[in-house]
Image (tube, rainbow, N blue to C red):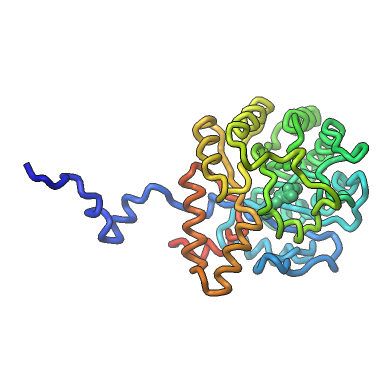
Amino acid sequence: MSALPRRRLRRLRDRASIRDMVRETKLSMSDFIYPLFIAERPEDAGPVPSMPGVSRLGLDDLDGEIERIASRGIRAVLLFGIPAVKDAAGSASHDENGVIPKAIRRIRGLRDDLAIVTDVCLCEYTEHGHCGLLREGRIDNDATNGILCRIALAHAAAGADLVAPSAMMDAMVAAIRGALDAAGRSDVGILSYAVKYASSFYGPFRDAVACAPKFGDRRGHQMDPANAREALAEAALDVAEGADMLMVKPALAYLDVIAAVRRRFPDHPLAAYQVSGEYSMIKAAAANGWLDERRVVLESLLAIKRAGADIIISYFAKDVADYLPQ
Ligand code: PBG
């Protein structure tokens, strides 16, 4: 008997064709959802300085952008709105003729094969930048759920396939499921931001849609980055409330949480959101020549999928089309 091990793993690594054959995790364009920021007023459109390569689009920019997205093989978009007017109650959020319903109808008219997912939250629409209705300076959870239902209904009426509530209110998924069903919209699904942390990686996004809270922060509703067991409790509640898909957000700093949710809820599709700060960090390092953008992007996306995500929401989705073998 030889003293050397019989199994030599390097045998399968030397040749690229064999490496590809034994690769466990693969990325494909159907894994991705591409976020879009849509401004109601044309003058609010334009590049987002802290997110090179990402722009706020005017409604008229959608025609060209949707064509570019679809031609790269992207199959789904996630819409965020920048309304013309913000107020204390975020009333523009559930206007059936608001920026997102208008965008949904426009996109539907352009491509019927694209899945349309919409962010359902108040922070883009409130002048104070909080994700809910305030009463004496604090978020009123259940009153906020009532508004989230109206937002979901407005998006469903315009033609959204999935609504993605991101406000982290307790029982929001049950409320929205009930409202959709009561309105005869049992066909519209819920991609729940089940596990959303109070993360500093959202910084560039808050520039993009001008939704940073004017006072305080979001630690009263988003999760404490120190907690992983609580993530399973959040996900369990959303599953019980009727979520069709779950999400963990951000992605790279929470790979353990993605893996844990995947293990505990094996039969729910799991999405992970590679958020604005994750995007901007890579962009900044690459612009300085410190990292190889293509390789680092693919490595991070692969890590997110290897941890257990089926779906990745990423601002890099358009670039990935150039990176993946055809
Ligand atoms: C809230 C929302 C946020 C993001 C998505 N939905 C911001 C927040 O919670 O402060 C962040 C996304 C990103 O950073 O890319 N509607």
Q: Is residue 314 above or below residue 289?
A: above
Observer-nearest residue: 148 or 70? Answer: 148
Quarter holding the C terminus is bottom left
Residue 323 image point, x, y percent: 48, 64
132 horizontally vs 251: left or right: right
Q: Residue at x 54, y 49 (%)?
A: 31
Q: Is residue 305 above or below residue 111?
A: above
Q: Is residue 171 above or below residue 115?
A: above
Quarter holding the N terminus is top left
Q: Is residue 72 visible?
A: yes
Q: How many marks?
A: 0
* Residue with the most extreme front position: 226
* Residue with the most extreme left position: 1
- Give the quadrant of residue 220: top right
Q: Residue at x 83, y 65 (%)?
A: 44
Observer-nearest residue: 281 or 27? Answer: 281
Q: Residue at x 36, y 51 (%)?
A: 23
Residue 112 image point, x, y percent: 67, 51
Residue 249 image point, x, y percent: 63, 45
Residue 70 image point, x, y percent: 61, 59
Q: Is residue 125 visible?
A: no
